[in-house]
Image (cartoon, rainbow, N blue to C red):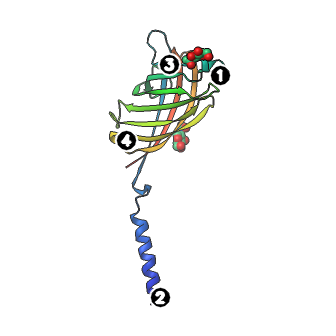
Amino acid sequence: MRIQFLLLTILLLSLQCNTSPVSGSRKVTNIRFYLHNTHSVNDPSSVLVAENKNATTHARGLVPFSSVYVFDDVLTEGPASTSKVIGNAQGMYVETGKDGYTILETIDCEMTDGPFKGSSFVMFSRNQFSNPSRELPVIGGRGAFQMAQGYGLLRTVCINCINSVNPSKGDIIEYNVTLYLH
Ligand SMILES: *[C@@H]1O[C@H](CO)[C@@H](O)[C@H](O)[C@H]1NC(C)=O
Ligand SMILES: *[C@@H]1O[C@H](CO)[C@@H](O)[C@H](O)[C@H]1NC(C)=O
C-alpha cells in the first residue's frame, strides 16, 4: 500500500514536471549584425536632443553625463558600411553614467531582409561602451519575435572612426543576439 502510494506520488510529480511551461518548447535563434551609428554633419543617424550643461562640468567622458540621443541606425550583415543591409535599429540612449562612458540604451531592431523580415526585437539595459564587449538583455519583440527573450553580446568594431570600412564618421558595433522564441 505504501509503495503504491509512493509510486503514485512519483508519477504525479513527474507529470507535473512534464507539463510545466519551462523553456523546453522554445526555439533558439542566433542573429548577428553590425550597427552603424553615424555622426556626420549632413545626414547623421544619431542626434543629440538634450543635455544639461551643468552636469557636464565635472563629468565629461566621451558622451557627457545627461546627454539624450535619438538614433535610426542601419544594420548590416558584415562590418563594412557598404555591406548588405539587413535591418534598422531605432531607439534612444541616455548618458546615465557620470563616467561619460555608460549609456542606458533602448533599441528596437527590425529585420528588413531574410526569414524575419518585418519582425523586431527590443533590448534595454545599461551599456558601458568603454568595455570592448558587453551584454544587453532582450526584453520582447513583435511579429516572429513576439514574447522573445534572450541576450545580445556587443563588441566594438570602432568608435568615432573614419576608415575604409566606414567612410562616414561614426561607431560600428557587432551585435550577436541569441533569441529564445515560442
Ligand atoms: C545651471 O546652473 C546655474 C547656476 O547654478 C543655474 O542658474 C541654471 O539654472 C542651471 N541650468 C540647468 C539647465 O540646470
Ligand atoms: C555569438 O553568441 C553565441 C551565444 O552566446 C556564441 O555561441 C557564439 O560563439 C557567438 N558568435 C560569435 C561570432 O561571437
Q: How far apart are marks 2 and 3 (CA)?
A: 72 Å
Q: Which residue is drawn at 38% across and 64% down?
A: 19
Q: Are marks 3 and 4 in contact (CB under 8 Å)?
A: no
Question: Could you tell me which residue is drawn at 51 percent across and 25 percent down?
Answer: 79
Residue 50 in the image, given as x and y percentages of width and height: 50, 19
Residue extending farthest to the right is 58
Q: Is residue 79 visible?
A: yes
State how far apart marks 4 and 1 are (Cα). 38 Å
Relative to 59, residue 14 above or below: below
Q: Earlier in the sequence, mark 4 or mark 1?
A: 1
Between 177 and 67, the one lying in front of the other is: 67
* CA–CA distance in space, label 2 to label 4: 49 Å
Q: Measuring 56% from the left and 24% from the top, which residue is drawn there? A: 66
The label shown at residue 59 is: 1
Q: Which of marks 1 and 2 is nearer the N terminus?
A: 2
Q: Nearer the viewer, mark 4 or mark 1?
A: 1
- Helix or strand or loop: what does disc 3 sit on? strand
Q: Quadrant of residue 121?
A: top left
Q: How many labels does the image show?
A: 4
Instruction: Please tell me in which quarter of the rendered image ligand 1 is found.
Output: top right
Which residue matches tag 3?
A: 50
Q: Name the residue under label 2.
A: 2
SS label for mark 2: helix
Q: In this view, does 4 lie above or below 110?
A: below
Sequence-first disc among 3 and 4 = 3
Q: How far apart are marks 3 and 1 (CA)?
A: 16 Å
Tell me: is circle 4 under 8 Å from ligand 2.
Answer: no
Residue 48's spot in the image, x, y percent? 49, 18
Q: Which mark is residue 145?
A: 4
